[in-house]
Image (cartoon, grey):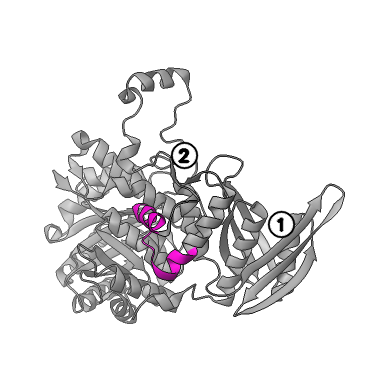
């Protein structure tokens, strides 16, 4: 049975989409879980795009790329030699580094974006691959907008870069233009046409603008592709990328058809999906394939009757196959620090030292408020603690007055660098009043652009998770907060966003390492 290489670009293509940006520590946390998921390649970032992206890529290479059985750590670069130099400086610490360089090959991009001739682009591609190959043996090349590129010209470029040292040639459907039958035929023709293609891994990178990303990826596998570039939860530019969990489980469930599989530990899929949601504050829709809340739910009477008699009647996968928890009670207010650490480790959160201390305090506070503490609660409070307090403002005290016929008002007390500040505010509602009070304390005026609230679990005492997008004088950032009190969760989310502006490099950078 053939093996398909899973190239995860959640931290690069996924992270650069609106609402999904991550700081260095968040990328590291996600990369560690991707390593536990056993993806083959982690594309950690675009190092030349910013100092923070360079730092994040470098730290993923240092800390995740040096683990036992570590995945390949990849960085993206344009074909400019300075880009490639910067990329190598970031990924060189990994046991298995890769440089991924790209340039557009469609006439649309050449004419309007690059303003270069076909010959100029071909020379630049060859020079870039040759330069990258001087740094490491593992070099990937992508002809951007491949689905709209002239086929013969694109094949000439691919043949030339393979000769220059490219070991993976990745064919991107950059704008999600392709349709499965057409895309499969194009991949098959590339196999038959490109000189030296047998010396390189043939890869695809599909976008979902027409809802075809997974279908195109699977069709490409049927046509000979042996690497798929994808993201957790299908996040990415515009409508997103091909969904990793859908591709992996399609190959696993239909081995009889595809005769191909991956090395991914599918039991880590659900955990990885939920971790990304907690980090970004953006959750998948309930009917999302594989990882949605309703993916294994049965409401129709006929379905329920069949499942009760035999699960195979309406389930082609088991929840256990993707590591879906049973939402059972795991800890209570009498549980100790060691028990919490062990359970968090089971959930993919290996905390120690100050991080564990903060999580344990938050857990004890939660256990005093709730009779039943679930895995989702633990994930929520840990994700919340990761965004609070270590850099910038912390909530010391919060008091809100609201009701029918009453002007909503709030008093907040915030702590920063050992000093305590207090002020009050009024607003259209309790959340607005709290945010105005925080603005009065900090002297920073934020404009709320998006706000979402969801329940981490069921029940009246469930943790509320708030995600909000805030504009601080032209700087737009996302913040997240969690609490059994949704007003407090809103305040924590707002402070999380504000602290990203005050400390744009992210929280607790001192813990990243040398």
Is residue 161 visible in the rendered image? The answer is yes
In the image, is residue 345 part of the stretch drawn in magenta? Answer: yes
Residue 226 vs residue 362, the one in the foreground:
362
In the image, is residue 336 part of the stretch drawn in magenta? Answer: no
Percent position (x, y) of residue 331?
Answer: 45, 48
Mark 2 lies on residue: 293
Kindly check if marks 2 and 1 are in contact, taking CB atoms under 8 A apart as contact.
no
Residue 322, quarter of picture: top left
* Residue at horizontal 55 percent and vertical 40 percent from the top: 458
From this view, report whether residue 83 is shown above or below residue 408: below
Residue 145 vs residue 375, the one in the foreground:
375
* Residue at horizontal 20 percent and vertical 65 percent from the top: 68
Mark 1 lies on residue: 431
Name the outermost residue toward the front: 334
**Dominant secondary-structure state across the stretch colored magenta:** helix
Q: Earlier in the sequence, mark 2 or mark 1?
A: 2
């Amino acid at each position: 049975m053939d093996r398909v290489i899973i190239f995860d670009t959640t931290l690069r293509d996924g992270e650069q989409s609106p609402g999904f940006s991550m700081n260095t520590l968040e990328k590291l946390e996600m990369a560690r879980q991707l390593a536990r998921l056993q993806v083959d390649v982690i594309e950690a970032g675009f190092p030349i795009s910013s100092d923070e992206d360079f730092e994040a890529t470098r730290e993923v290479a240092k800390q995740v790329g040096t683990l036992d059985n570590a995945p390949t750590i990849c960085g993206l670069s344009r074909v400019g030699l300075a880009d490639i130099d910067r990329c190598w400086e970031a990924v060189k610490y990994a046991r298995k580094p890769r440089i991924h360089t790209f340039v557009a090959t469609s006439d649309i991009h050449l004419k309007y974006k690059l303003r270069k001739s076909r010959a100029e682009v071909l020379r630049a591609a060859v020079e870039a691959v040759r330069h990258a190959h001087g740094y490491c043996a593992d070099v990937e090349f992508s002809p951007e907008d491949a689905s709209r590129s002239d086929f013969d010209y694109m094949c000439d470029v691919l043949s030339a870069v393979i000769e220059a040292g490219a070991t993976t040639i990745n064919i991107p459907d950059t704008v999600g233009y392709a349709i499965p039958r057409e895309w499969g035929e194009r991949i098959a023709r590339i196999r038959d046409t490109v000189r030296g293609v047998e010396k390189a891994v043939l890869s695809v990178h599909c976008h979902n603008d027409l809802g075809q990303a997974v279908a195109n990826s699977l069709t490409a596998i049927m046509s000979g592709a042996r690497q798929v570039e994808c993201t957790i939860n299908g996040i990415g530019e515009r409508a997103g990328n091909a969904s990793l969990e859908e591709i992996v489980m399609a190959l696993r469930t239909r081995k009889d058809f595809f005769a191909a599989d991956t090395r991914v530990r599918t039991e880590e899929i659900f955990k990885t999906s939920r971790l990304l949601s907690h980090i970004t504050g953006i959750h998948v829709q309930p009917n999302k394939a594989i990882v949605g809340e309703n993916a294994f739910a049965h409401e129709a009477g006929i379905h329920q009757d069949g499942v009760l008699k035999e699960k195979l009647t309406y389930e082609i996968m088991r929840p256990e196959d993707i590591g879906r928890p049973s939402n059972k009670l795991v800890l209570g207010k009498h549980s100790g620090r060691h028990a919490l650490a062990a359970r968090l480790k089971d959930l993919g959160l290996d905390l120690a030292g100050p991080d564990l201390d903060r999580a344990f305090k938050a857990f004890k506070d939660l256990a005093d408020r709730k009779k039943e503490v679930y895995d989702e609660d633990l994930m929520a409070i840990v994700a919340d603690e990761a965004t609070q307090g270590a850099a910038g403002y912390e909530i010391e005290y919060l008091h809100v007055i609201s009701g029918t016929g009453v002007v909503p008002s709030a008093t907040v007390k915030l702590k920063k660098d050992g000093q305590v500040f207090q002020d009050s505010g009024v607003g259209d509602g309790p959340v607005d009043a709290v945010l105005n009070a925080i603005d009065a304390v900090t002297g920073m005026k934020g404009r709320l652009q998006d706000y979402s609230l969801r329940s981490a679990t069921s029940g009246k005492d469930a943790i509320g998770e708030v995600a909000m997008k805030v504009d601080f004088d032209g700087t737009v950032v996302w913040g997240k907060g969690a609490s059994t009190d949704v007003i407090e969760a809103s305040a924590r989310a707002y402070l999380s966003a504000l602290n990203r502006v005050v400390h744009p490099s992210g929280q607790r950078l001192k813990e990243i390492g040398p």
